[in-house]
Amino acid sequence: MKLIIQIPCLNERLTLRETIADLPREIPGVDEIELLIIDDGSSDGTSELARELGVHHIVRFPQNRGLARGFMAGIDACLKLGADVIVNTDADNQYSGADIPKLVEPILAGRADLVVGDRQVESVEGFSPTKKKLQRFGSWVVRLASNTEVPDATSGFRAISREAATRMFVVSEFSYTLETIIQAGQAHLAVAAVPIRTNPKKRESRLFKSIPQYLRRSGATIVRIYTMYKPLRAFLAVAALLFLTGSALGMRFLYYHFTEDKTGHIQSLILASILLVCAFIVAVFGLLADLVGANRKLLEDVVQRLRRVEYDLPRRLAAPPPPAPGPAPREGKSSPPSA
């Protein structure tokens, strides 16, 4: 059983040493533990320090590509290196490395494919009351979209089985946290959460500059991913809203047409007609999107099979060949007795 701990980095020279020192070197049930750094275009010598600290593998981008692409580059590298379990943590030592055994235990026991660390946001001292409320609301929305029970959806401290890693396709350029949970839930993977501890805050987040920006980008990610996996439901919900509004305006026009002046309220009739036509168009788009979604699922299955062939081939080649079978005994003859 091989575990690789991957750490996305962007100018993390000041905190990387402490983060790596906090990681466990032995875990029950794990035979090998290796470290992998994803250097997302750092300019402060993060990769050089990682080599000095004995990091086993380094993936480096010449310029910044964003957290989501860095995360997926790490997942791809871990799979190629033969990881059975992948743990993702932050380079600012936000999460307690001593909780990694707790994080991987559900995967080792076969109870989960994806395990998300629950920071128990209410007890985190570095979070303001506003941020705590937003975290709870965002996690609630993700639970609805993913049909999972993850209490802390934005936590980057998570363990991923090899099976789940081969199924991950992050298309967002903002963050991987929300998308991977929704994707895992819609793929019917076993998703679990375990309580974890956090260390004192070292610096402000580099993922976003303000709460409104984070809300805008996170909301767009949730809507986009949910629409990818449930296009018919999403489009029909919009079509139903347009249809009900148009029908209400149409009923209003008919009521006044038969009870009062027959020549008034033309605006209601025009608006009702527009809304009903729009509802029909959106419903048709939903059917087309559902067909595209079915095609996407087939493509994901193909890519997953190709990934398995690509990533598992080196493991099969490295494995010792099975012993050659001996000659089959001939019928009617017994072997001579030993002396």
Image (cartoon, rainbow, N blue to C red):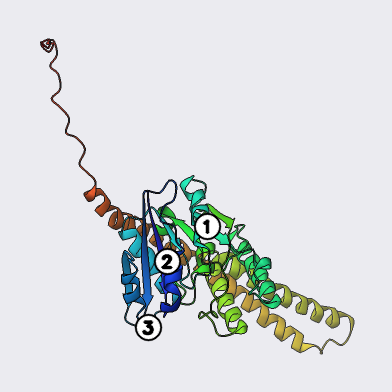
| Residue 97 appears left or right of 274 | left
Mark 2 Cα shell of 10 Å, populated few (<14), some (14-19), many (≥20): many
Which labelled disc corresponds to residue 20?
2
Measured Cα–Cα span from mark 1 to mark 2: 14 Å
Expressed as whole percent of the image width and height from the top left, the position of residue 231 reads 54, 67
Task: Please give the name of the residue rendered at 68% of the width and 77% of the height, measured from the top-left corner.
Answer: 128
State the SS at label 2. helix
x, y (%) of residue 44? Answer: 37, 83
Q: Quadrant of residue 119?
A: bottom right
Three-letter amino acid code of the residue under disc 3 = Asp
Which mark identifies residue 44? 3
As shown in the figure, which amino acid type bears the numbered disc 1?
Answer: Asp
Residue on which the image places disc 1: 99
Spatial separation of the CA atoms under disc 2 and disc 3: 17 Å
Residue nearer the viewer, 231 or 243: 231
Q: Does the residue at mark 1 contact the one at mark 3 (Cβ under 8 Å)?
A: no
Which of pointers 1 and 2 lies earlier in the amino acid sequence?
A: 2
- Front residue of 279/3: it is 3
**Image coordinates for residue 146, horizontal then vertical, percent:** 58, 61
| Residue type highlighted by circle 2 | Ile
| Coordinates of residue 251 in the picture (x, y in percent) | 79, 76
Residue 19 is drawn in which quadrant?
bottom left
